[in-house]
């Protein structure tokens, strides 16, 4: 069998210049009004606060609820991990 209208079977649909809008990705099909990044963040924060039922009061993050010693240990562990990765990469290039 041959393809009609000169289409090749290897033609990928993303290379089509005149695709129909219903053939795009899921994100392409979402109808969103144009807005700035600040407006998008404001709407996102409003949606999060209304979903949590917290009103306008900010909800504390995970680190804010921890004891100061635990925060210090988390910071130290992160720094040790970063140094270990950097030393490992240095060892790989030195070998």
Image (tube, helix red, strand yellow):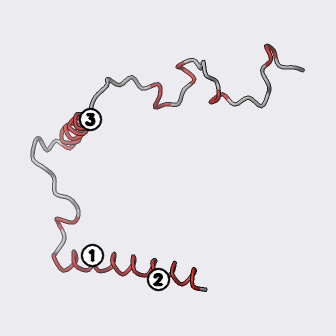
Image quadrant where one finds the N terminus: top right
- Name the N-terminal-most of marks 1 and 3: 3
Furthest residue toward front: 94
Image quadrant where one finds the C terminus: bottom right
Q: Nearer the viewer, residue 87 or 41?
A: 87
Residue at numbered disc 3: 40
Residue at numbered disc 1: 75
Q: What element carries label 3?
A: helix
Q: Nearer the viewer, mark 1 or mark 2?
A: 2
Answer left or right for 69 relative to 27. left
The mark found on residue 51 in the picture is none
Q: Nearer the viewer, residue 21 or 66?
A: 21
Furthest residue toward top: 5
Question: Could you say where residue 55 lies in the image, as x and y percent from the top left?
Answer: 11, 41
Q: Which residue is drawn at 51% across and 81% down?
A: 90
Question: Could you say where residue 46 lies in the image, as x and y percent from the top left?
Answer: 19, 37
Q: Residue at x 53, y 30 (%)?
A: 25
Work out how far the residue at label 3 is from the one at label 2, CA to CA, in angstroms: 40 Å
Q: Which residue is drawn at 33% across and 78% down?
A: 79
Q: Identify the image quadrant of residue 23.
A: top right
Work out how far the residue at label 1 is from the one at label 3, CA to CA, in angstroms: 31 Å
Q: Identify the image quadrant of residue 47.
A: top left
Residue at numbered disc 2: 87
Above or below for 90 versus 65: below
Q: Identify the image quadrant of residue 42.
A: top left
């Amino acid at each position: 069998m041959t393809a009609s209208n000169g289409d090749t079977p290897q033609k990928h649909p993303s290379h089509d210049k005149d695709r129909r809008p219903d053939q795009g990705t899921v994100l392409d099909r979402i109808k969103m009004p144009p807005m700035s990044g600040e407006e998008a963040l404001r709407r996102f924060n409003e949606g999060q606060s209304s979903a949590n039922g917290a009103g306008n009061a900010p909800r504390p993050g995970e680190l804010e609820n921890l004891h100061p010693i635990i925060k210090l240990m988390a910071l130290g562990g992160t720094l040790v991990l970063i140094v270990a990765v950097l030393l490992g990469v240095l060892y790989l290039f030195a070998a």
